[in-house]
Amino acid sequence: MSVVTNTTTIGAIEAPSRRNTELALLIFAVAIPVFAYANVGLALTGKLPSGMLGYGLGLGLMAGVAHLVVRKFARYADPLLLPIATLLNGLGLVLIWRLDQSPRLIQRAKLAWGKFSPDAPHQLLYTAIGVALFIGVLMLLKDHRILQRYTYISMAVALFLLVLPMFFPAVNGAKIWISIPGLGTIQPGEFAKIIIAIFFSGYLMVKRDALALASRRFMGLYLPRGRDLGPILVIWALSILILVFETDLGTSLLFFGLFVVMLYVATERTSWIVFGLLMSAVGAVGVASFERHVQSRVNAWLDPFACYTSDKSGACEQIGQAIMSFGSGGTLGAGLGQGNSDLIGFAANADFILSTVGEELGLAGMMALLLLYGLIVERGVRTALAARDPFGKLLAIGLSGAFALQVFVVAGGVMGLIPLTGMTMPFLAQGGSSVIANWALIGILIRISDTARRPAPAPAPSSDAEMTQVVRP
Amino acid sequence: MSELTLTVMRLGFLAVLWLFVIVAVQVIRSDLFGTRVTQRGSRRGNDANRQQQTGRQAAAAAPPPQRGQQQGGGGRQRRGAPTKLVVSEGTLTGTTVALQGQTVTLGRAHDSTIVLDDDYASSRHARIYPDRDGNWIVEDLGSTNGTYLDRTRLTTPTPIPLGAPIRIGKTVIELRK
């Protein structure tokens, strides 16, 4: 008799731990940035860059430690999250290093600040802090349900973090940074997105029945009762306030979008999405009509090449340059180190790092990169499906939703799909807060997926099992 | 550096990047596309044909084997998958319910799939359903007297091994092939 072997599926029950798969992928994920590094060095100077070993070892070491910690503390975690995060972070490091080598950017920095300091070593340091936080999350957070206890505390903390930048001076027109003397600047919005997801999941877990069931049906839509509209109105008002006072479209959109996504997932009511879209459209149009900073962003989005035909300059020039860099990249790209995306100048390695990807790796590389982001989100949603407790489900959806929204807002902004915002591409862009916060986000997702995929413990024999036996006649 | 080397490296890097994406997708393939269905007829030649014929004879005698939910149209019954639910003890002894891939509800309520005439059963006592891999899961629906798999009281949805007795009051139910 021939035996037919079925391929095993990754179900919620009796899944293999898959740590070896993760290790293999992780080695691959470290090798790709090293290859990219060599590629940039060969293209720019004709020889292998001297720091190649250092960066490769640094990234490999961090990935290895993270893997060992996952092996020890989250044995059943999802095998894809860590390798993809490592790969994205490694690619980000290479791209930042590549832009550090650009004579144009060095010249520009010397003109603007009198000196030039490369960003890649800082980014490596931030990555190390991020991985340390990731390890800390896995070691200290034994069960994600503990976070549920801090539902309202996290609301207060998140609001504090979101409001804080209002009291600091605007940097480049947006108030999203706070500066601590001696430490540098922090973007609290990045951390707030994790904390606000904890609050939303704790809150919606308790309130979702009221929000889902108490409604009337009208024209195929479930209309919620007036008083149930309260929370969404409050969140909407808050995000509008952020938009007005911090003039930051990204944080506002992320904050409100996350709430709508989680509300929809918690209640299964499409009407929330309709309301959310309507309200955000009204809010965005309303604010854009009188806030100058937002207005200039919208104008640059509507006509990216206006500054080439008229005398206006500023934000619109960046978008025009970004679009041109995508265009000059074409399908297969110019090759790492061979593009001219450094012409963008300002924030070339932060908000506009995607245009370097687009120009040097082309459409093919860009699609691969977006797929990698998509895979992280997919694993997050998958974790939410597999999670057994409602809080974990909502938190996993919230975190991956925040991640997805951020990728959309940044990529959409750089590519000219939506007005440009002040957010950074997770893991890829230069910026300490972003890298650190996203490693923490991945840490929490890995913790939830470990709990979700862990085989259910054998049911404990209960004491009354003997008493309630089958009564035989 | 020569133009050729750089072009090769450029395309090579894209290839490696895509290879990573493809490998990553392969790792979660079963999550994305469901279980792969092995076509025994086309792959195993004569041996498999003979086997299929004996399978058909068996199928004629027994209730028709049900297809697993996740398996595509051309797929055959997964080996060792249960096809029916048999009541082996209690007032309903001998009753069988073919498993069609839908949820089987157990309880005293009239709309249950198996209406239990049992003083120890609750009106909505338990349900048995396939998960997305085709494993059958039993879940207690908050019954008063509990549902037992073997001799342990269920607290969470639990997969049912073939032939393991599920006890509800005086009634015992098993999954059989």
Image (spheres, coloured by chain):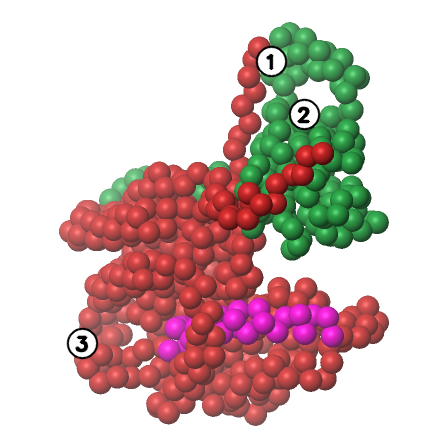
Chain colours: A red, B green
User: Does A305 sit left or right of A95 as displayed?
Assistant: right
Q: Say which amino acid is labelled 3.
A: Lys
Helix, strand or loop at mark 1: loop
Considering the image in quadrants, where does the C terminus of chain A appear?
top right
Q: Of B14 and A69, which appears nearest the observer? A: A69
The structure residue drawn at horizontal position 76% and vertical position 13%, both measured from the top left corner, is B57
Residue B55 position in % (x across, y down): 71, 15
Screen quadrant of the N terminus of chain A: top right
Question: Mark on residue B4?
Answer: none
Residue A20 in the image, given as x and y percentages of width and height? 35, 38
Instruction: Determine the chain carrying the residue at label 3.
Output: A
How far apart are the alpha carbons under marks 3 and 2? 77 Å
Please tell me how crowded label 1 is: few (under 14), some (14-19), or many (20+) other residues with Cα within 10 Å.
few
Q: Amino acid at mark 1?
A: Arg
Kindly report which numbered mark, 3 or 1, lies closer to the viewer in this rendering.
1
SS category of the residue bearing label 2: loop
Query: What residue is drawn where x is 50% and y is 44%?
Result: A461
Residue, disc 3: A115
Nearer mark to the viewer, of 3 and 2: 2
Residue A205 covered by magenta stretch: yes
Q: Measuring from the top left, give residue B90's x and y in whole percent.
A: 74, 35
Which residue is at 53% across, 69% downward?
A201
Can residue A316 be seen in this snapshot?
Answer: no
Determine contact: label 3, label 1, CB under 8 Å.
no
The residue that label 2 is drawn on is B177
Hey, which quadrant is residue A106 in on the image?
Answer: bottom left
Would you name the residue on which mark 1 appears?
B44
In this rendering, would B59 be left or right of A20?
A: right
